[in-house]
Image (spheres, grey):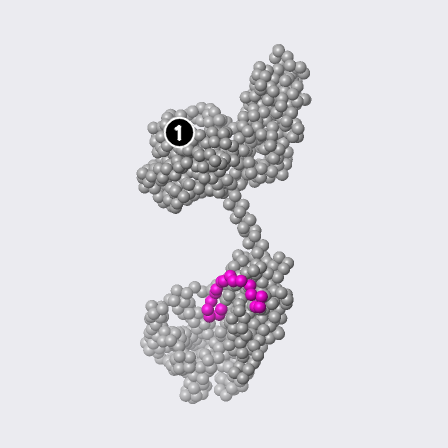
Amino acid sequence: GLAASARVLIFSAVLVGATVLLLTVGPLSTDQAIRRIAPVPVVVALLVGLFMAVNLAPLSVRFRGRVTLILLEETPLLLGLVAVSPLVLVMTRVVADLAVFGVVRRQAIYKCGFNLASGAMRTAIAALIYRPILDSHGVVGPYGWAAGWAALVAATLFSNISIGAVRLLFRQRRDTKYAASSLIGSALFSVASIVLAFVVLDAAVLEVWAIAPLVLVAVLIVYAYRQYLLLDDRFGALQQLYDFSRSVGVISLESTGTGWAILEQVLAVMRTRRAELVMSDGPHVHRLSLHAQAGRSRTTEPLDQSTLVAHVMAMGEAELITGRTGPRGQEVVADSLFGEFENAVAVPVSSGGHIAGVLVALDRAAGFEALSEDDLRLFEALAAHAGSTLERARLVEELRLEAESKSHQATHDSLTDLPNRTLFLEYATASIAETGRAAIALLDLDRFKEVNDTLGHGTGDRLLCEVAERLVRVVGDRASVARLGGDEFALVIPGVIGPEEAIGILRDIEAAISRPVHLDGVTLAITASAGVSLGPEHGDNVATLLQRADIAMYHAKERRSGIELYSASHDGARQRKLLLGGQLAQALSSGDQLSLMYQPIAELATGRIVRVEALARWYHPDHGQVPPDEFIHIAEQMGLISRITEFVLREGCSQLSKLRRAGFDIDLSVNLSGQDLGDPTLVPKIANALSANELLARCLSLEVTETEVMEDIAQAKEVLAELGNLGLRIAVDDYGTGYSSLAYLQSLPLDELKLDRSFVSNIATNQGNWIIVRSSIAMAHSLGLLVVAEGAEDDLTCSMLAQAGCDEMQGYYLSRPLAPADLMRWLSSRPKLTFPEQPASHPLRVVAGRGHDLV
């Protein structure tokens, strides 16, 4: 631009001014020639000729694949430092540079001005360095060589600095990728040039005409080197082919990006004006076209069987097409796909073991011979590399699509395809971070369970999909919608100024949902309850806002008001829930309030203690012992359950390792939340906990309630199968309280079934529960499942369970949950479960192995 050019001219003027000062009033103003080699006019003419020669014919040096232009100016510069005064030398240099840059090359004013100013200044700097070092010593000898080296190196350094300054003025960045190799190459040839300059100077000191044969030798060497470069250029395509084979290994493996990169290499290697990559999918072809002047184009069109592409694909062989040479020169060839061209080479491209397309190079660029058989063979080699690269790109694309599909499945609800809880939390966190303000809304369908119970889960699922579609249509780009599970949906509304905006959106949703829904010949009237919280008024993080929106939603359900904005005046129970939620996050961070208790589990057949179940406990410094059901529910609502699970796994496996090292051959059971099944880090967490404590996978049982499994049975199958493959045991907990479906039990990779305490605890007095327990045990055994009974509180219950064939039991009759130290002492007493073989009316006790009775 003009501004950059002006800055360069100003910089050049500064260099000119500095040079003039050095020559007129500076240390160089009175210096004369150091030694008379020849008459001044002869020396000046010689120097002008040498300076012009080195500028007109720079030496093109190729070093490690890089090209550097070397000006062999050291010889005339060193001769001038000795034979003429600094003023004459600078003027001689300016005249030579002006003739080359201004007259012959006709450079722009700012370029010519910089070259003149830079050449004059570095000549003056060389004189400024050379003369003080040389002093009164001879120009031939150690002092002369030292002075010459110092002067010429200083001139070279100044040249590099001035060029760097111009780059800065043009705001250009230097390509540092090959800076080291370029510097090495330049340095080597600079050293050679300086040595040549000393040889010429030494000869000139003896006899000025002695430099003639040296100059002739130098000219011959340069000529020979140029001929070598010409010969090297003839094989340049082979080098470019090699470069291409290397470059395709690192280019983008996105299929379209790979295609463009290949076409760019085709233009460079084949020296053609056009390159085409045509891929076929049967009736159509997809073209990527790259033209040296017109640029890129991408089209899809029907495959014409008369085209060059169709012919090459049908024959499976490369083709060379050239127009015949007529009286008016090369005549063109017509093709319905490529139009007119003079010459072309086309090579089939394989993908997946079959010919999928054709790579084509058309029309040799001006100045090069027409495409020939040699070019065809070269192009076949290039196409082989291109084909393998495209095949890799295809495979990578398939893997990418598969990864995107899995990522989508991990972050989206499988039924409605809405974002799930994980992605919703990311959206909400990003919205709060970007704008500082956001609204979180939770929406729950009223009486949805009645739809499921009356019309079936299939109808319920279709209803959820219809509601999801209405939500997305209504909110548009005003909010992001997610399904958190069941019939609960969530919205994040970014940049909300006040509650009116958020409530207005929810009113629109309310109106859309309330429209009748027609499913399976039945018309349904649907209503919903929604709660809203605002950030930062109601909280500065997503967990808090989500919890408070939940409080507001339940308040809306209780009041049947439809929509409620969160208020701290809501009932005290929810206030406690809110406070405990924030404090639970702190407790998890500090790690000093949560602990584990362990309830033993015994085999009914042998009475042996086979494992313990880890139970999380929270002792709050102000509220005391918080019931597990309460804080677990809070954790699930706040998205903290995975952290609690991680704590239980870490502490439980650590304690189990201690017990096993102490000689107790027992295992561990850990409860999982339904949210844990959606945690992509669950399997690594479990594997790390086992590995850190040197435990085998078979030592750990994982318990999941059947209700949580049924919320997303497809995901549950996948995750439980992955856990089972690790060697872990999988149990369905609280069996009998949910769906209790034999069909889903058969489809899951289960090892155990745990009967809920609500059925087990009163089998001695409730005939219905006794029937349920017996039939559940029989059914589980028919499926190859081990059965564990919870809530066995007396010897009669244990006896009845044993009679029914139950495998294991846990309950207060055996032991209450124990702290780690108490558990260690209890196990050290070698306890054993005993009970009468036939149901009895009198209670029995747990008998310790050493003769001590334990109640």
Task: Give the percent coordinates (x, y) of residue 152.
Answer: 46, 74
Q: Looking at the image, which residue sits at the far top?
A: 842
Determine if residue 218 is in view: no
> Which stretch did the figure color magenta?
291-307
Q: Residue at x 63, y 28 (%)?
A: 780
* Mark 1 residue type: Lys
Q: Which residue is mark 1?
A: 557
Q: How many marks?
A: 1
Magenta stretch: includes residue 292: yes
From the viewer's perspective, is 29 left or right of 68?
left
Residue closer to the observer: 96 or 604: 604
Looking at the image, which residue is at 61% across and 20% down? 771
**Image: 71 above or below 248:** below
- The residue sitting at 42% across, 24% down in the picture is 623
Q: Residue sitting at 51 percent across and 65 percent down?
A: 289
Residue 149 visible in the current orientation:
yes
